[in-house]
């Protein structure tokens, strides 16, 4: 379709024709059946867009999408903060356990299970006294 015919078709669709353009518009519709099809397609597009326009204005699609994005961002930040907290606690716990192990090894001058449990210096009489008191 020629550019001038397309411009007349657009003006006709928007109802912005002068009287002389109106006759050209009618002539175009009579001579070119694809012009009528184009107008029908444009009408379908406009009707679909009008349906979306109401939902966008009333806080439908746009607002709900933005709210979802904000919630996902907040959840992502919360999960990252939890990860950092758990990581810091884990490193601190590992360091404390390593220091405790080092202390036991230095006190006992050996690395054995009794020393780790703190029962290296106990005798069998100590166990009986310990159990009798409880």
Image (tube, rainbow, N blue to C red):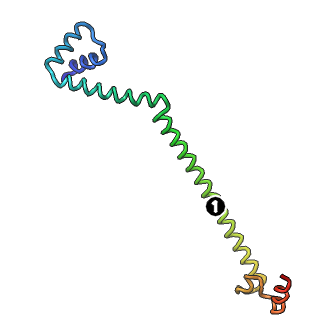
Q: Quadrant of residue 50?
A: top left
Q: Residue furthest bottom?
A: 124
Crowding at dot 1, Cα within 10 Å, few <14 / some 14-19 / many 20+, comes out as: few
Residue at image position (73%, 86%) is: 114
Q: Residue furthest top?
A: 19
How many labels, in total? 1
> How far across and how far down the image is residue 125, in percent?
84, 92
Question: Looking at this view, is 86 or 2 the one in front?
Answer: 86
Q: Image height check: is 59 above or below 14?
A: below
Left/right placement of residue 31 relative to residue 3 reads left
Question: Looking at this view, is 64 or 21 the one in front?
Answer: 64
> How far across and how far down the image is residue 58, in percent?
49, 29
Question: Looking at this view, is 102 or 60 the one in front?
Answer: 60
Residue at image position (77%, 82%) is: 118
Q: Quadrant of residue 121?
A: bottom right
Left/right placement of residue 56 relative to residue 5 reads right
Residue bearing the label numbered 1? 86
Quadrant where the C terminus sits is: bottom right
Residue at image position (19%, 12%) is: 24
Q: Image height check: is 129 above or below 22?
A: below
> How far across and how far down the image is residue 74, in percent?
57, 46
Secondary structure, mark 1, is helix
Quadrant where the N terminus sits is: top left
> How far across and how far down the image is residue 124, in percent?
80, 92
Left/right placement of residue 48 relative to residue 93 reads left
Q: Quadrant of residue 43?
A: top left
Q: Image height check: is 43 above or below 77?
A: above
Residue at image position (30%, 13%) is: 16
């Amino acid at each position: 379709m020629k550019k001038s015919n397309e411009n007349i078709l657009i003006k006709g669709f928007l109802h912005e024709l002068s009287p002389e353009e109106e006759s050209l518009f009618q002539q175009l519709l009579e001579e070119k059946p694809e012009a009528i099809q184009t107008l029908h397609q444009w009408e379908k597009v406009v009707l679909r867009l009008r349906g979306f326009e109401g939902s966008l204005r009333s806080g439908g699609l746009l607002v709900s999408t933005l709210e979802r994005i904000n919630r996902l961002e907040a959840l992502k930040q919360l999960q990252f903060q939890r990860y950092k907290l758990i990581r810091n606690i884990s490193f601190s716990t590992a360091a404390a356990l390593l220091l405790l192990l080092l202390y036991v090894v230095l006190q006992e001058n050996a690395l054995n299970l009794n020393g780790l449990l703190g029962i290296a210096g106990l005798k069998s009489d100590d166990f009986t006294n310990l159990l009798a008191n409880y």
